[in-house]
Image (cartoon, rainbow, N blue to C red):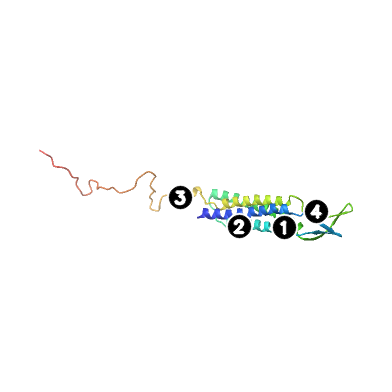
Amino acid sequence: MEAGVTVLLTVMVGLFGLTSAVLGFIAEAQSLTPSDIHVSGSECVYPANPAHALGVCAILLLAVAQITASAAGGCCGCCRPGGGASKSTRRVVGVIVAMLSWIMAMIAVLYYWKGVEWNAPGTHPAAIAGGNEECVYFKDGGFTRAAILSIVATSLAIKSCFLLRAPASTPEALEGADEPKADGQHPPEAGVAVGLPQWPAPGNGHAPYSHPAQG
Protein backbone atom coordinates (compact mmCIF):
# COMPACT_ATOMS: atom_id res chain seq x y z
CA MET A 1 0.00 0.00 0.00
CA GLU A 2 2.83 2.38 0.90
CA ALA A 3 4.59 1.68 -2.40
CA GLY A 4 1.41 2.43 -4.35
CA VAL A 5 0.96 5.77 -2.58
CA THR A 6 4.59 6.69 -3.26
CA VAL A 7 4.23 5.91 -6.96
CA LEU A 8 1.00 7.93 -7.17
CA LEU A 9 2.59 10.96 -5.48
CA THR A 10 5.69 10.85 -7.66
CA VAL A 11 3.52 10.62 -10.78
CA MET A 12 1.66 13.73 -9.65
CA VAL A 13 4.93 15.57 -8.98
CA GLY A 14 6.29 14.57 -12.38
CA LEU A 15 3.09 15.59 -14.15
CA PHE A 16 3.04 19.07 -12.59
CA GLY A 17 6.76 19.62 -13.10
CA LEU A 18 6.85 18.48 -16.72
CA THR A 19 3.76 20.53 -17.55
CA SER A 20 5.50 23.57 -16.11
CA ALA A 21 8.52 22.88 -18.33
CA VAL A 22 6.35 22.44 -21.43
CA LEU A 23 4.65 25.78 -20.76
CA GLY A 24 8.09 27.34 -20.41
CA PHE A 25 9.17 26.09 -23.82
CA ILE A 26 5.93 27.36 -25.36
CA ALA A 27 6.38 30.74 -23.65
CA GLU A 28 9.86 30.98 -25.17
CA ALA A 29 8.34 30.67 -28.63
CA GLN A 30 5.69 33.28 -27.82
CA SER A 31 7.98 35.75 -26.06
CA LEU A 32 8.09 39.36 -27.27
CA THR A 33 10.81 40.37 -29.71
CA PRO A 34 12.13 43.88 -30.41
CA SER A 35 9.96 44.06 -33.53
CA ASP A 36 6.84 43.51 -31.39
CA ILE A 37 7.57 46.47 -29.07
CA HIS A 38 6.60 49.95 -30.25
CA VAL A 39 8.02 53.29 -29.16
CA SER A 40 5.53 56.05 -28.39
CA GLY A 41 7.29 59.27 -27.48
CA SER A 42 9.66 58.35 -24.65
CA GLU A 43 7.84 55.16 -23.69
CA CYS A 44 7.93 51.60 -24.97
CA VAL A 45 4.57 49.95 -25.53
CA TYR A 46 4.48 46.22 -24.85
CA PRO A 47 1.48 44.47 -26.46
CA ALA A 48 -0.36 41.55 -24.89
CA ASN A 49 0.97 38.12 -25.74
CA PRO A 50 0.53 34.53 -24.47
CA ALA A 51 4.00 34.33 -22.90
CA HIS A 52 2.84 36.36 -19.90
CA ALA A 53 0.02 33.96 -18.94
CA LEU A 54 2.11 30.90 -19.79
CA GLY A 55 4.88 32.05 -17.48
CA VAL A 56 2.45 32.60 -14.60
CA CYS A 57 0.94 29.13 -15.06
CA ALA A 58 4.42 27.58 -15.23
CA ILE A 59 5.32 29.16 -11.89
CA LEU A 60 2.14 27.91 -10.23
CA LEU A 61 2.56 24.36 -11.54
CA LEU A 62 6.18 24.20 -10.45
CA ALA A 63 5.22 25.43 -6.99
CA VAL A 64 2.50 22.78 -6.73
CA ALA A 65 5.00 20.09 -7.76
CA GLN A 66 7.51 21.17 -5.12
CA ILE A 67 4.91 21.44 -2.36
CA THR A 68 3.51 18.02 -3.24
CA ALA A 69 6.98 16.48 -3.17
CA SER A 70 7.77 18.09 0.19
CA ALA A 71 4.50 16.89 1.69
CA ALA A 72 5.08 13.38 0.33
CA GLY A 73 8.55 13.30 1.85
CA GLY A 74 7.31 14.48 5.23
CA CYS A 75 8.38 18.14 5.03
CA CYS A 76 11.80 17.16 3.61
CA GLY A 77 12.09 14.37 6.14
CA CYS A 78 11.45 16.54 9.21
CA CYS A 79 7.94 15.18 9.85
CA ARG A 80 8.70 11.47 9.43
CA PRO A 81 10.13 9.23 12.17
CA GLY A 82 13.73 8.13 11.93
CA GLY A 83 15.04 4.58 11.87
CA GLY A 84 18.29 2.67 12.08
CA ALA A 85 21.67 3.52 10.64
CA SER A 86 20.77 2.78 7.01
CA LYS A 87 17.48 4.64 7.39
CA SER A 88 19.23 7.69 8.82
CA THR A 89 21.76 7.75 5.98
CA ARG A 90 19.00 7.49 3.38
CA ARG A 91 17.08 10.23 5.15
CA VAL A 92 20.08 12.61 5.12
CA VAL A 93 20.61 12.00 1.40
CA GLY A 94 16.89 12.52 0.79
CA VAL A 95 16.91 15.85 2.64
CA ILE A 96 19.95 17.04 0.66
CA VAL A 97 18.30 16.07 -2.63
CA ALA A 98 15.09 17.83 -1.58
CA MET A 99 17.02 21.02 -0.75
CA LEU A 100 18.77 20.93 -4.14
CA SER A 101 15.38 20.49 -5.76
CA TRP A 102 14.06 23.61 -4.06
CA ILE A 103 17.16 25.59 -5.05
CA MET A 104 16.74 24.61 -8.70
CA ALA A 105 13.03 25.44 -8.53
CA MET A 106 13.67 28.89 -7.04
CA ILE A 107 16.16 29.74 -9.78
CA ALA A 108 13.63 28.58 -12.37
CA VAL A 109 10.95 30.76 -10.78
CA LEU A 110 13.28 33.79 -11.00
CA TYR A 111 13.71 33.21 -14.73
CA TYR A 112 10.00 32.66 -15.17
CA TRP A 113 9.14 35.81 -13.21
CA LYS A 114 11.58 37.91 -15.19
CA GLY A 115 9.99 36.69 -18.40
CA VAL A 116 6.50 37.36 -17.04
CA GLU A 117 7.50 40.89 -16.06
CA TRP A 118 8.90 41.85 -19.46
CA ASN A 119 6.12 40.17 -21.41
CA ALA A 120 3.30 41.80 -19.49
CA PRO A 121 1.19 44.26 -21.52
CA GLY A 122 1.87 47.88 -20.61
CA THR A 123 4.42 50.66 -21.03
CA HIS A 124 7.96 51.18 -19.77
CA PRO A 125 10.26 54.18 -20.14
CA ALA A 126 12.56 53.90 -23.13
CA ALA A 127 16.30 53.70 -22.51
CA ILE A 128 18.56 56.23 -24.24
CA ALA A 129 21.61 54.63 -25.85
CA GLY A 130 23.78 56.59 -28.26
CA GLY A 131 21.08 59.19 -28.77
CA ASN A 132 18.53 56.54 -29.74
CA GLU A 133 15.59 55.29 -27.74
CA GLU A 134 15.71 51.57 -27.04
CA CYS A 135 13.27 49.22 -25.36
CA VAL A 136 14.32 46.51 -22.93
CA TYR A 137 13.01 43.05 -23.70
CA PHE A 138 13.43 39.55 -22.29
CA LYS A 139 16.47 38.03 -23.97
CA ASP A 140 16.19 34.84 -25.95
CA GLY A 141 16.59 31.67 -23.93
CA GLY A 142 15.24 32.92 -20.61
CA PHE A 143 12.11 30.79 -20.61
CA THR A 144 14.11 27.85 -21.96
CA ARG A 145 16.54 28.00 -19.04
CA ALA A 146 13.59 28.14 -16.66
CA ALA A 147 12.01 25.09 -18.32
CA ILE A 148 15.23 23.07 -18.10
CA LEU A 149 15.65 23.99 -14.44
CA SER A 150 12.05 22.92 -13.85
CA ILE A 151 12.85 19.47 -15.23
CA VAL A 152 15.95 19.20 -13.04
CA ALA A 153 14.03 20.34 -9.96
CA THR A 154 11.23 17.87 -10.65
CA SER A 155 13.66 14.97 -11.12
CA LEU A 156 15.36 15.77 -7.81
CA ALA A 157 11.98 16.09 -6.09
CA ILE A 158 10.91 12.65 -7.30
CA LYS A 159 14.23 11.19 -6.14
CA SER A 160 13.78 12.73 -2.69
CA CYS A 161 10.28 11.23 -2.44
CA PHE A 162 11.61 7.73 -2.99
CA LEU A 163 14.47 8.25 -0.54
CA LEU A 164 12.33 9.71 2.24
CA ARG A 165 9.37 7.35 1.85
CA ALA A 166 11.29 4.09 1.33
CA PRO A 167 10.58 1.48 4.06
CA ALA A 168 13.33 0.82 6.55
CA SER A 169 15.33 -2.41 6.18
CA THR A 170 17.81 -2.00 9.00
CA PRO A 171 20.01 -4.72 10.52
CA GLU A 172 18.13 -4.29 13.81
CA ALA A 173 14.89 -5.30 12.12
CA LEU A 174 16.53 -8.34 10.58
CA GLU A 175 18.11 -9.41 13.88
CA GLY A 176 14.77 -9.12 15.65
CA ALA A 177 13.38 -11.98 13.59
CA ASP A 178 15.94 -14.42 15.08
CA GLU A 179 15.65 -13.33 18.72
CA PRO A 180 14.32 -15.95 21.20
CA LYS A 181 10.76 -15.67 22.40
CA ALA A 182 9.75 -14.69 25.91
CA ASP A 183 9.52 -18.34 27.08
CA GLY A 184 13.12 -19.01 26.06
CA GLN A 185 12.25 -21.04 22.98
CA HIS A 186 14.03 -20.38 19.74
CA PRO A 187 12.18 -20.30 16.44
CA PRO A 188 12.57 -23.45 14.36
CA GLU A 189 15.38 -23.44 11.85
CA ALA A 190 14.67 -23.59 8.16
CA GLY A 191 14.29 -27.09 6.80
CA VAL A 192 13.44 -28.72 10.19
CA ALA A 193 9.97 -30.20 10.41
CA VAL A 194 8.14 -29.55 13.66
CA GLY A 195 5.25 -31.77 14.73
CA LEU A 196 4.03 -34.52 17.02
CA PRO A 197 4.60 -38.23 16.38
CA GLN A 198 1.65 -39.94 14.77
CA TRP A 199 2.14 -43.30 16.58
CA PRO A 200 2.70 -43.84 20.31
CA ALA A 201 6.24 -44.74 21.27
CA PRO A 202 7.04 -47.85 23.38
CA GLY A 203 7.13 -47.37 27.12
CA ASN A 204 4.23 -44.98 27.46
CA GLY A 205 1.84 -47.52 29.00
CA HIS A 206 1.22 -49.67 25.92
CA ALA A 207 3.13 -52.89 25.29
CA PRO A 208 4.41 -53.49 21.81
CA TYR A 209 2.35 -55.98 19.80
CA SER A 210 4.04 -59.19 18.70
CA HIS A 211 2.84 -62.34 16.96
CA PRO A 212 2.89 -65.64 19.01
CA ALA A 213 5.63 -68.03 18.16
CA GLN A 214 4.61 -70.86 15.82
CA GLY A 215 5.67 -74.38 16.88
- Kindly identify the residue that appears in the image at 69 percent across and 57 percent down: 54
Residue 58, percent across and down? 67, 56
Taking the image as shown, residue 86 lies to the left or right of residue 99, namely left
- Looking at the rendered image, the disc whose residue lies closer to the viewer, 4 or 2, is 4
Q: What type is the residue that disc 4 sits on?
A: Ser
Q: Which mark is residue 50?
A: 1
Counting labels gives 4
Residue 77, percent across and down? 59, 55
First in sequence: mark 4 vs mark 2: 4
Which residue, given by chain and number where applicable, does mark 2 sit on? 68
- Asked whether the residues under the numbered discs 4 and 1 touch, taking CB atoms below 8 Å apart as contact, a structural biologist would say no
First in sequence: mark 3 vs mark 4: 4
Which residue, given by chain and number where applicable, does mark 3 sit on? 176
- Kindly identify the residue that appears in the image at 60 percent across and 57 percent down: 68
The Cα atoms of the two marked residues, 4 and 2, are separated by 40 Å
- Looking at the rendered image, the disc whose residue lies closer to the viewer, 2 or 3, is 2
The Cα atoms of the two marked residues, 3 and 4, are separated by 73 Å
Q: What type is the residue that disc 3 sits on?
A: Gly
- Density class for disc 4 (Cα within 10 Å; few <14, some 14-19, many ≥20) is few
Q: Quadrant of residue 109?
A: bottom right
